[in-house]
Image: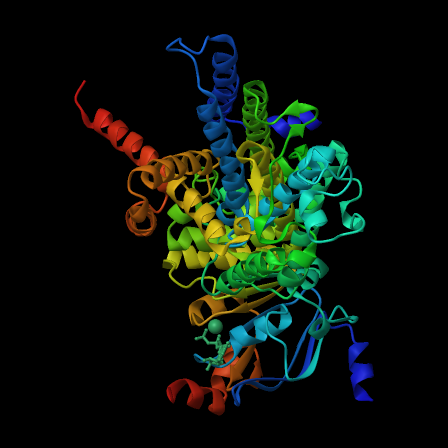
Amino acid sequence: MTDTSMRSTSALLYLSGVTVSFDGFKALNNLSLLVEPGEMRAIIGPNGAGKTTMMDVVTGKTRPDSGEVVFDGRADLTKLDEADIATLGIGRKFQKPTVFENHTVRDNLLLALSGLRNWYRLLLAMPTRAENDRLAEILSIIRMEEQQHMLGARLSHGQKQWLEIGMLLAQDPKLLLVDEPVAGMTDVETETTAQVLREINKTHSVVVVEHDMSFVRALDVKVTVLHEGSMLAEGTLDQVSADQRVVEVYLGR
Amino acid sequence: MITRFLLQGMNRSLRLFVLLVLAVGVALPLLNQLMPPGSPFHVPAWLLQLIGKYLSFALLALAVDLVWGFCGILSLGHGAFFALGGYCMGMYLMRQIGSRGVYGNPLLPDFMVFLNYKQLPWFWYGFDNFGFAMLMAVLVPSILAFALGWFAFRSRVTGVYLSIITQAMTFALMLAFFRNDMGLGGNNGMTDFKEILGFSVQADSTRAVLCFASALTLALGLIVSAAIVGSRFGKALTAVRDAESRMRFLGYRVEGYKLFVFVFSAAMAGIAGALYVPQVGIINPSEFSPANSIEAVLWVAVGGRGTLIGPVIGAFIVNFGKTWLTGALPEVWLFALGALFIVVTLLLPKGVVGLWGQIKARSQAKKARAPT
Ligand SMILES: Nc1ncnc2c1ncn2[C@@H]1O[C@H](COP(=O)(O)OP(=O)(O)OP(=O)(O)O)[C@@H](O)[C@H]1O
Ligand SMILES: [Mg+2]
């Protein structure tokens, strides 16, 4: 079968013929997508195109009705649960920022820090030198040293977005799935976020979903356009925005 | 390592509170034993018994709070773990009666003779040994909690469904324990205890020691709970409470965390039950009644969910109110309980301890505003 030959490609993330339906409505319709190791990919598409659902499928939150989802050429993500998939090295930033509201910024990062996950190890775990250094490093990248002892609940929307990016860094996954990172950010913050993501992309693969076209332009990466659960076009931002079908989809809404 | 683990969760107010619990647990028994009965400082035995009972309720409340306040599992079945611990103690106490029972059978408790048992049922073996019985008071609730938690948490049963399952568990156990053929005393339960470890359960000195033991156990429970809650495990636990799926996406096996606190908490409830039974002198199936578990949740809500001091304070306040009201105006108690529930959920979401925090914050803000 062609499936096996595709599986042995070098793709880090491989989706083929993925369909998800909610009560008969197809949120994803025979979607195929390839992300190469080290790549950063932007995914755009109108509301309801299925972008978040795609991330739900990859992270094990939603099971596809059919289709293949393979990570790193070997792990069948449709068979694993959220914790397994996270452990394999897929991290996720949610569309609606979700940080731990009753924990400080620092503890949020500590919980995300890669490594300890077993409950019995955590009972006796003491923070190590290496962990503290890493936390300091991340706090400086996301520019939140001053807020490190502030509770998550007291952060502004933009600060929560930053904290979530910091948590992704702490988790240090092979592949980052970032859902609408600049929603609610000012232009300056948006610009900085693009810089940070490009920096992260030097050592990680990234899939980023975003509506903000100036942000996507600033990323300057290959773009995939989703529409009604399937891929509509793929290429540079200039290429896809010249595509007649893409123009129709965006003007038509 | 162990001491560092145990001390990590202690802050100043908790340290003071543990000392207070211990002070009460030492002072009351001493005032009972050392002061002559006529003296105004003499603590009567009934008061010792009452405080000892409250202390065991406080331990149960702490257990409920560990799962509900810190992990978001609203268990409406902790009364069952408490009762199982109590039954283990009851079985030990029954076997201490020996041939002093009404029927004078050296081996079989009275109710078995009455029901024409010819030999001791297998599960009564070993209960003549205090250590074994206490081990069972911890193990039996733990195993039940493990079995229930294993299935519920793996199949991701949460929220109100979990509450209903736990409530159904205690109800089912109540029906089972009412049956005579369970071999555990049927609806009369177990009573008329004579001795514990060779000391008369009626004696003032025994009551004094039991009251002290309850305070000591509660203090230990507070210290260990503080250590768990203050550890990195505790941080993960409250994170599971606040955003369970987020924890899964970070790679945490949430079930393991829930299962550990649930089992630990059930063990604590079992110990509380074992302390309760010799002080009240009876254990019967009504201890499994669903209302008991709900009341324990109310103690936590009144005192302050998600704090360690709160459940202890809540258990004392509500039970003091209950003792007083059921004496003065018995028919009012249930209404008072319902009213309390409404008042607390509407006005005091963080309980008495939260109210105290609010008052302190307000007075500090006033001080800060006042010109100096
Ligand atoms: N759990 C669900 N149950 C039912 N329908 C759902 C569910 N999740 C998503 N959908 C539907 O699937 C479609 C795709 O949703 P999805 O959230 O993936 O869109 P999106 O591309 O992320 O949109 P947006 O840009 O608004 O975030 C929408 O029509 C949505 O209503
Ligand atoms: Mg979306």
Q: Quadrant of residue B109?
A: top right
User: Which residue: 28% across, 47% down?
Assistant: B347
Q: Is residue A84 visible?
A: yes
User: Which residue: 59% across, 70% down?
Assistant: A61
Point out the residue furthest to the left here: B371
Q: Closest to the observer: A139 or B109?
A: B109
With A149 as the anchor, is B206 left or right in this view?
right
Q: Compared with residue A187, is residue A134 higher up or lower down, i.e. above or below?
A: above
Q: Compared with residue B311, is residue A83 higher up or lower down, i.e. above or below?
A: below
With B117 as the anchor, is B337 left or right in this view?
left
How many numbered discs, if any? 0
Q: Closest to the observer: B182 or A113?
A: B182
Q: Position of residue A219 (x, y in %)?
A: 53, 65
Q: Closest to the observer: B52 or B199?
A: B199
Look at the image and tell me in which quarter the N terminus of chain A lies: bottom right
Q: Position of residue A99 (x, y in %)?
A: 48, 53
Q: Compared with residue B369, is residue A185 higher up or lower down, i.e. above or below?
A: below
Look at the image and tell me in which quarter the C terminus of chain A lies: bottom left
With A189 as the anchor, is A141 left or right in this view?
right
Q: Is residue B251 visible?
A: no
Q: Position of residue B13 (x, y in %)?
A: 45, 25
Q: Compared with residue A81, is residue B50 higher up or lower down, i.e. above or below?
A: above
Q: Position of residue A86 (x, y in %)?
A: 66, 60
Q: Closest to the observer: A203 or A33?
A: A33
- Report the coloring of the rendering: rainbow
Q: Quadrant of residue B264?
A: top right
